[in-house]
Amino acid sequence: MGKVQYCMVIDLEACVGCSACDIACKVENNVPASFAWSNHIIETVGKFPDVKYRYIPTLCNHCSNAPCVAACPTTAMHKLDNGITMHDPSKCIGCAACRIACPYDVIYFNDKEPLVREEFLEPLIPECTSSQPGIQKKLGVPVGYYNPEREATLPGIRPRGVVEKCTFCDHRLAKGLPPACVEACPANARIFGDRNDPNSEVSKVLAKNHARVLKPEKGTEPNVLYIGEF
Amino acid sequence: MSSTLENSKERSMLDKDDFNSQYVWGELARFISGGFSSPLNMSGEEPENLRKLMVKAPPEWVPAIQKFADLWKTALNDKEALSLAYARLFLGPFEILAPPYASFYLEPDHKVMGATSFWVAERYVEAGLKPGDGPKEIPDHVALEWEFLYYLTYQYLTSRESNWLEMRENFIRVHMRRWIPMLSKEIKKAETHPFYSYCAELMVDLIKRRAV
Amino acid sequence: MKMKLEGQVEEVVNKKVTRRGFLKGMGGLSMAALMAGSPMLKYFAMASPEEAQKELVSKWIASTCQGCTSWCPVQVKVINGRAVALRGNPYSKANHGEICPRPHLALQQVYDPDRIKVPMKRTNPKKGRNEDPRFVPITWEEAMDMIAEKMMELRASNETHKFVLFRGRYSYMRDIIYSALPKIFGSPNGISHSAICAEAEKFGAYYTEGYWDYRDYDLENTRYVLSWGADPLASNRQVPHAISIWKKVKKQAKIAVVDPRLSATAVKADEWLPVIPGEDGALATAIAHVILVEGLWNREFVGDFVDGKNAFVPGKTVDESSFKENYTYGLVKWWNIELKDRTPEWAEKICGVSAEQIRRVATDFAKAGPYAISWLSPGASMQVRGGYTAMITHALNGLVGSTDHEGGVVQKTKVPAYSIPDIKPYQDEMAKKNSKKPKIDQRGTLHFPSLKKGKSGGGVVTNNAADAIIKEDPYDVKVAIAYWANFTFSCSGTDRWERALQKIPFFVHITTHASEMSHFADIVLPAAHQLFEKWSFLKSKQNLYGYASLTQPVIEPMWDVRQDETEIPWLLAEKLAQKGFDNLYRYFKEQFKDPETGKAPTNSKEFAVTAVKMFTRSCWDPTDKNYGKYGEKLKGWADFVEKGVWNSHRFKPGKIREKYKTKTGKFEFYSLTLKEALEKHAKKHHTTVDAVLEATQYTARGEQAFVPHYEPAYRWGDPSEYPFIFFEHRSRLNREGRSANCLWYQAHKNADPGDENWDDVLKINPVDAQKLGLKNGDKIKVVSPTGSIVVKAKLWEGVRPGTVTKCYGQGHWAYGRIAAFDFHKRIPRGGNNNVILPPDYDRLSGSTARHGGVTRVKIEKISQA
């Protein structure tokens, strides 16, 4: 009663598979290049010339029945009152039980120094080009485009030894802004809101469309839903 | 680290509008910062100034301040011994017994100037600070962090805007509490000098008293 | 230890009451006394209000993305002086606040650790791909001095025409460096990249409706989109607008995509027509044939038979007088010369698309007309014989009356902007004389008509400049400056550019990254990044709105960089003046005045801003004669800087068709405009039009040359030795070949259908792969008659058997440590298509023929051992 349950509906009909969501997420959340809090499943089916290509954007499903939360031995992975599956790195012991439990492969483990690229440690051309340490020294941030706003609810960069994943941009929601992937989607294929509020756009869209979730058989009750066909 | 119960007790420790205790706490933070500075940078007036602070301090703090001032005074009598202890603890050149940087404790591989240093530096900038002309240290050095707490307290007391206090409490909660106790433990374990051992004890005490 | 501390805390808590009591006794102390002065800081200093303000600012500042030629108005989020995010500019009516993935990638360009920080000088005099240039840092002063010195030598020897300015991508500040600099100095050689871009496309619209430019498309109101290799959901043009409206388009219209590859747009279409590369002309003429035979042409635009009876019967000629045309010219001629035998059954055998599908698409397209779009792209026109394909595909718009019509294909609203002031008074005798010498690219010669806007030699033949330099024909180039260009990577036949650059005695490269072209430079000048560090403006159109969009320095430049199109020519002018040639400097000082203050610029930075203000004045200055005439009235310069974009009125179709700028004033199915151009070119070379066609690789002879007609694909390589037709395509993440050093580009590469992250794959149909014994990920050598690359195989059903395809963009052996597999050993990541693509041309437009399956290849498996 009156409890917020955040939810995202992705309209595959509108989605064109451009990956702007994936990149905008990395920008917003300082996600290492090798991770993808926002990601996609792609497949090409059929035989030439009757070929179909599908692109399904994916992210943490913020399941109502979250296996990652159940698996976490330290309560580092936990549910917030608004339905977000949140992670607290200070409690994380890096056991990766959540990763194993998650059927969607959306949790990433920092097994090395985040955002550091071996390639960039030394200047490419001595004295003529820079390096990652050079940029750090000049700007005082790990990478030039580092977003300090992420720090509001999580370490701006998650340290080595802990997991990380999509938080529905909880730090943006706190300011009344939609998640970065929603704002970045040029097709406006992502609808975000409170599914417990009958007047929210998501509720209206869900009422009008047959929505699906990924791997319903797992019983996770995802809060990322899909409508339409790619 | 701390249970909720403990937090709630600490929250009641000091009234945020309690000017005098905030003032004394801020000054103590400044003295801690000074204590962790190189003995070469000490003016020699610290013990006397600390004693002056006792007048304004809540009575239960007085013995601690008194002890701090006495130890400092004794330490200054043999500045060479103090410098030697300082070097062994914090500088090297051989083994550094208690690295005074947050990143040493918080970063994988003890990497200095990693994410921790950046985070700390951002907080300084956010609070309207820039590097001064004095001694240079990396942002997450213990002396800088304590001076930062002093500065935030000062700003709060002069403006009475609670955001300064929030900044301070947040800095302690999400950052300093994670490493200051570890540093303290290392310093005390090393047993190089009673002055530093006491600084170590006092700073943990101060942090515990502050968290909101 | 821990226990003890907690005990202390406990103890103190219990004494709370005492503390309270004590505090009452403290009343005598005033706060002021305690807190006088400022905080006593040892390690810190307090930032000044300005500094503090700056540090805390989080602001969206307008600029323009030049990641492709959509040129979208964007905004950059700046926190603490750093750019941290991008979004579409909400003031823009063109992209209505949406952006594609490309602008985000720009963050990894501007903050790329591999960017060049300072001017560099080559210390290894030997040039070659395998020579380390041994660059060392120098000052701007030194660099400009050396360049001016070399240029002055050309003045001294009266060889100023041996100076070349190569231009790659540009903004509309371009004429300062590209036109004023060479012409006042005394050279004809401003050589642009245009002909490796899409000039052949313009050929189609020009020789049918007299419009040498890109068209705009009324997606909002269309009922049919027939795309000819166009992939607007991924690449040029108007990508974000197309993406944002595609769901609506799909609902209200049918979408058919002609592309040998299952493109990003093909996967979101109703019909995919996987044409055999280069045979688009057969498909297009067959569609035209069906439209006429079925009587589906647009009566209002094209007209009708006098007796109202359709006499277009396959194989039968028609009496010209029996048909009365309205807005068009030469329909019956076209039918008689070309279309009457172009049945779908004929086309099916050539283009690989079934007759049934051709009929269906033709019928649906025509029935949707005039609310229909035949969308021409480089894919179907940048081919050896692509000029005519461009004409046919555009002529389809004429047949269904969709050109200059709601829901169809339209021209543009004027974007009022000024260019550079008159240079003539600043050209001395030497400059006047030498800048009239022939240009280095051999345009206008018999083999290179390059008929831009009807003029022989009217357009550039970019890629041929390499051969001309090597052959010293018409002369030897001595000093060259290239900016925002990387021809050793982006032009087909890359080896020729390596040889050409090796040959130029003094070569200067203005660039953000040490690219394949920089490798041959004597001096490398670090350029400001266009989106974040530069003053300029762009003119473009999307969604039927024209616009002027500003780029501005939204951050302090990262390094010791200068703005390529304004600051650098200014610095050079200063140096030339010091050395005794002050014409350029005087031109800049005397002719450039701030429109608001009337002040002349005193340094390079002021010059940059002054020039932008002058050029864009009509958009924001109420005293300008064009203010408000074509669109919005911005309230002064500050308003323009704040909003970042000026929008035109929405284009209203229907007026242009009343008088096309063709020879006949009509939409020409029989092009008198082209006839005249070809005849003039033939006459210039004292020969016939047929001889011109022969010299330019075209097969048409006689009257066929003047109508849009089918030309068989031209390919390099014998099918017996090179069994596969190779064709290339674009990436939705390419920032024109400049984003390969971005981690995010590599990490998300599989957003291009069929591609793989962190890799460069040749897509091959599984049927063909099986024959070669290839499986996914096998390392293969792709060999064409002119080069070879090593990449990985990707088995994919989205490509026609017998053809193989690979995306352009990877294969850098320079540019940085992500782009190149090993920068120092010059080993590319993947392979550059331009290594295997032979340097060939659509010679009628001067375009580089990089599409249409211009070459065949063979594939050799490399053993994994």
Image (tube, rainbow, N blue to C red):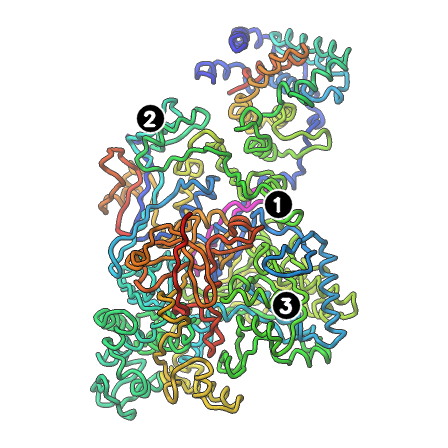
Secondary-structure class at tag 2: helix
What residue is shown with label 1?
A: A123
The number of numbered discs placed on residues in the rendered structure image is 3
Q: Earlier in the sequence, mark 2 or mark 1?
A: 2
Name the amino acid type tagged 1: Pro
Name the amino acid type tagged 2: Ala
Residue C401 lies, in percent from the top left, at: 32, 77
Give the chain letter at badge 3.
C
Given residues C258 and C399, the one toward you in this image is C258
> Where B94 sits versus C681, above or below?
above
Secondary-structure class at tag 1: loop
Res. A71 mark:
2
Give the chain letter at badge 2.
A
Q: Is residue C314 left or right of residue C670?
A: left
Q: Is residue C171 left or right of residue C220?
A: right
Residue B72 lies, in percent from the top left, at: 71, 12
Given residues C253 and C34, the one toward you in this image is C253
**Mark 2–mark 1 distance (CA, rounded to whole Å):** 44 Å
| Magenta region, residue range | C76-98
